[in-house]
Image (cartoon, rainbow, N blue to C red):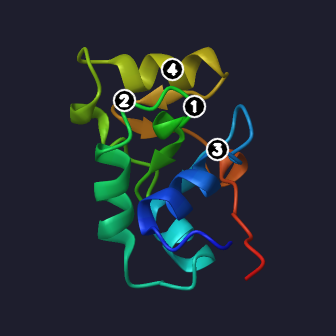
Amino acid sequence: MENDNFFERVYAIVRLIPYGKVTSYGAIAKALGTARSARMVGWAMNASHHLEDVPAHRVVNRNGLLTGKLHFDGTNLMQQLLENEGIVVIDNQIKDFEVVFWIPKVEV
């Protein structure tokens, strides 16, 4: 990717997450070659809510928890968006996380 802006690089990966799949902040960071920057990926996700083409609801923590749900309008919007894609969420955690987990791959 030629864009040097970290947030834009994060958004480019998030746009690739298939419908009905999720990935983690750490998996995105690792794909970008910055494995220790999962927290910065989280900041990028928090800043993405004004971008309609970034499916931020598909990014969760490494255990499948909806840790970013507080940054969505409405109490359960993140969960509702995931459930609309067929992902089961119980107590803010994705059921069968390993089945719906998508590993991003970026060619540098």
Quarter of the view holding residue 36 = bottom left
Residue 5 as seen in the image, left or right of residue 69: right
The single residue placed furthest to the right in the displayed view is: 107
Provide the secondary structure element on which disc 3 rests: loop
Classify mark 3: residues with Cα within 10 Å, few (<14), some (14-19) or many (20+): some
Mark 1 or mark 4: whose residue is earlier in sequence: 1
> Which quadrant of the figure contains the C terminus?
bottom right
Disc number placed over residue 53 in the picture, else none: 1
How far apart in space, not on screen, are marks 3 and 4 (Cα)?
15 Å
Please say if the residues under marks 2 and 3 sit with CB atoms less than 8 Å apart: no
Query: Which residue shows up at 69% across the image and 64% down it?
Result: 104
The residue that label 4 is drawn on is 81
How far apart in space, not on screen, are marks 3 and 1 (Cα)?
7 Å
Please say if the residues under marks 3 and 1 sit with CB atoms less than 8 Å apart: yes
The residue that label 2 is drawn on is 50
Vertical side of 17 occupied by 33: above or below: below
How far apart in space, not on screen, are marks 4 and 2 (Cα)?
16 Å
Classify mark 1: residues with Cα within 10 Å, few (<14), some (14-19) or many (20+): few
Provide the secondary structure element on which disc 4 rests: helix
The residue that label 3 is drawn on is 15
